[in-house]
Amino acid sequence: MLASYIDQAMEQAVYEIIEDEKTYWGEIPGLQGAWARRATLE
């Protein structure tokens, strides 16, 4: 059940690349505080 919820939330994730830092930034709308910044999209 939890895995299904996470999978559905990840389908709503939004990503963009930060050119200055050459990193990716992403968030899940509706989940306040759920965001990440990494060197690769994976």
Image: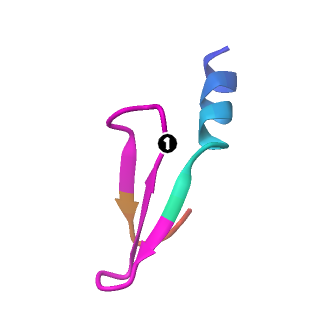
Q: Quadrant of the N terminus?
A: top right
In percent of the image, x 49 and y 42: which residue is there?
28
In percent of width and height, residue 23 lies at 38, 74
Q: Image height check: is 9 above or below 27?
A: above
Count neighbours of disc 1 (C-alpha within 10 A) and say few if under 14, some if 14 to 19, many if 20 or more.
some
In percent of the image, x 61 and y 41: which residue is there?
10
Q: Is residue 3 magenta?
A: no
Place residue 17 in its image quadrant: bottom left
Residue closest to the eye, 26 or 30: 30
Amino acid type, callout 1: Ile
In percent of the image, x 38 and y 47: which residue is there?
35
**Circle 1 is placed at which residue position?**
28
In percent of width and height, residue 6 lies at 60, 30
Residue closest to the eye, 1 or 25: 25
Q: Would you say 1 lies left or right of 39 here?
A: right
Place residue 7 in its image quadrant: top right
Residue farthest to the top, as pictured: 1
In percent of width and height, residue 30 lies at 47, 32
In percent of the image, x 56 and y 48: which residue is there?
13
Q: Image height check: is 20 above or below 31?
A: below
User: What range of the chain is rendered magenta?
Assistant: 16-36
